[in-house]
Amino acid sequence: MKLALCTDVLADLPFPEMLDKVKNYGISGVEMTAGGWSPCPHVKTEELLASADKLARFRAELHQRDIEIVALNCSGNPLAPGVLGEKHTRSSYQAIELAGKLGVKKIVMMSGLPGGGPEDKVPNWITSTVSWPDYMPGVIDYQWNEVAIPWWKTFVAHAKQHGIEKIAIEEFPSQLVYNPATLLRLRNAVGDMIGMNLDPSHLIAMGADPIAAVRKLEGAIYHVHGKDARIERGLADIDGLMEYQPVTATKSRTWNYVAVGCGQDLQWWKEFFSVLRMTGYDGYVSLEMEDLTMSVEAGLQTSIDALNMTMSR
């Protein structure tokens, strides 16, 4: 396994300076956002698609530092009703086209989440039993069979035309794919270009065991995020893990994203990577640093040190 960095954490640095910073950390792989929710601080997708000269200069900056784009990230909600879905669909298709021009073979995305029916104006995440109320089964059927599966079949065909080999979907809360079972449902319906970007922090925050998930997903893990979460003792015990407070309210939330090793200990991370390697994954691990309890520099260095001590190489 090799360590990469999700570069949005260095959004305040211009592209060349960001790449220099990455090299200073001893990292030679980057995952950069090219669409979706992110402001895409380092990848101006439309500009790069429109200008062969800008694209060549962009590639030259990477080449002269011997840095590889391990994946372009386009995490958003292309299945959302209305303007948002249209915007994220457009940026997803453009990210695919840019990846093709750059020779990048892997895209990291989220599945998207539709409304609960054709008239809904906002996405609707169903997490309770479909046994009651009795309208729930119809919502699930609409979201999967009328929206998600047709969209993804068309999108996968587009990706194949541009030389993409893998689409790694992050199992994120408030998305249609949020755990191994839902990932496998989409994969079985659409094909094996679809796999998972396994981000252990999300499974931890939903009360699941990422190590058990690795075994379940053998052969279907296409990318991994190095990201940790901590269940906050004395708070989660009372209110559980269904948490809607803003991520900035770290002191009162029942769980938080934290630097690697500040949630699960290093022995846990060693087992996680060992099982990943045992089940066939030997690709990049992209550090995604979103710990708001410490400085960016401290969070990055803490996470890099922890990952370098635990990754199976």
Image: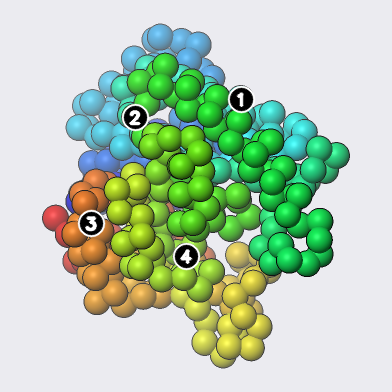
Q: In the rendered structure, which disc, 1 or 4, sits on the residue that comes first in sequence?
A: 1
For disc 3, the neighbor class at 10 Å (few under 14, some 14 to 19, many from 20) is: some
Q: Quadrant of residue 244?
A: bottom right
Disc assigned to residue 279: 3
Can the viewer see residue 291? Answer: no
Please give the residue where the numbered disc 1 appears in the rendered image: 90
Q: CA distance from mark 3 to mark 1?
A: 35 Å
Q: CA distance from mark 1 to mark 4?
A: 29 Å
Q: In the rendered structure, which disc, 2 or 4, sits on the residue that comes first in sequence?
A: 2
Q: CA distance from mark 1 to mark 2?
A: 20 Å
For disc 4, the neighbor class at 10 Å (few under 14, some 14 to 19, many from 20) is: many
**Between marks 3 and 1 in the image, the one whose residue lies nearer the viewer:** 3
Q: CA distance from mark 2 to mark 4?
A: 25 Å
What residue is rendered at 75% in x and 37% in y?
Answer: 81
279 relative to 15, above or below: below
Q: Amino acid at mark 3?
A: Thr
Q: 67 or 203, which is in the foreground?
A: 203
Q: Position of residue 122 (x, y in %)?
A: 78, 46
Q: Amino acid at mark 2?
A: Glu
**Between marks 1 and 4 in the image, the one whose residue lies nearer the viewer:** 4
265 relative to 174, above or below: below
Please give the residue where the numbered disc 4 appears in the rendered image: 203
- Left or right of 108? Residue 267 is left
**Between marks 3 and 2 in the image, the one whose residue lies nearer the viewer:** 3
Q: CA distance from mark 4 to mark 3?
A: 18 Å
Please give the residue where the numbered disc 2 appears in the rendered image: 165
Q: 165 or 54, which is in the foreground?
A: 165
